[in-house]
Amino acid sequence: MSGIRRRKGLAVVAAGAALALCPSLGIGQTRAIRFGLTPVFLDDRVRLLRQWALYLEGELGSSVRFMQYGSYTQVMDALRAGELDLAWVCGYPYVLYRQELQLVSVPLWRQAPLYQSYLIADKASSVRTVDDLRARTFAYSDPLSNSGFLYVQHLLRSARHDPSNYFKRSFFTYSHRHVVDAVSQGLAEAGAVDGYVWETLAELLPAVTARTRVLLRSPDFGFPPIVAPRARSAAQVTQWAHALKQMAVHPAGRLILKDLRLDGFTDGTPSLFDSIATMSREQRV
């Protein structure tokens, strides 16, 4: 447990200062465009984020600073306080704060703006179904994560279980990567992760996922979107969305998308997140 706790602590310390991964280069406007992220699987991918910032700066004519936070709550607090111009968040906080946010763009993964939640278990464990998880130790990613929390809560309620006492113990790792680590290291018998993250880790770092297996895949959900506060102008949002969509046809943009294991970005529609909104209402009842 000490390894996970140590990494989580470092993430929270970094978030407290809103770690600036890409310093402003002083291009165009005096204030950089501030782009918020949670770790997801980008824990140590500073090179990729620098390349992404350089691409966006070339398209937008303004400096871009990626700001990494330790949780979705911290990202949302920064967005709502006007400390960020846009952020890559999960569909769950987007539907919770939809009245305060506007959709900028939605990533395309495997040619669609969709992804799934994966319930994973230790490859050597006897767990075969969700019923086998009763009284086990379970790792969630983030309390504002759809794939890493909300969907599991919905799944258990749909089976007439009480999520608050179904597991022997549950805990948050505040990173999908750390959920995989917790399961593979025996700190949790199962966990919930973003399917895109698990599949990307399986491709880039197969040793990380090798000791886990997918127990269950959820229905499709709208892929975690990029959003902006309502206060940002329509012209700004249109410009940002265009720059993201142009990545698929720009040589440097295509290289970044390849590293992200994404096919591009699309405008998306709020209706993509209706099923998450339904589960969110159930969660508040």
Image: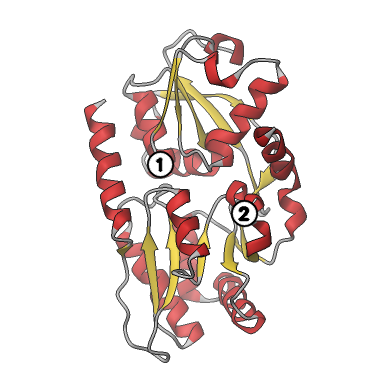
**Mark earlier in primary sequence (1, 2):** 2
Name the amino acid type tagged 2. Tyr
Image point (33%, 21%), residue name? 187
Residue denoted by label 1: 175
* Quadrant assignment, res 107: bottom right
Instruction: Quadrant for residue 284, please give it.
Output: top right
| Image height of 171 relative to 127, above or below | below
| Quarter holding residue 221 | top right
Of badges 1 and 2, nearer the viewer stands: 2
Task: Answer left or right for 253 relative to 115.
Answer: left
* Label 2: which secondary element: helix
The residues tagged by marks 1 and 2 sit, at their Cα atoms, a distance apart of 18 Å
Pick the quarter of the image with the N terminus: top left
Q: Is residue 231 above or below residue 225?
A: below
Q: Position of residue 21 (x, y in %)?
A: 31, 65
Q: What SS does tag 1 mark?
A: loop
- Expressed as whole percent of the image width and height from the top left, the position of residue 33 reads 44, 77
Q: Residue at x 71, y 33 (%)?
A: 282
Q: Which residue is mark 2?
A: 94
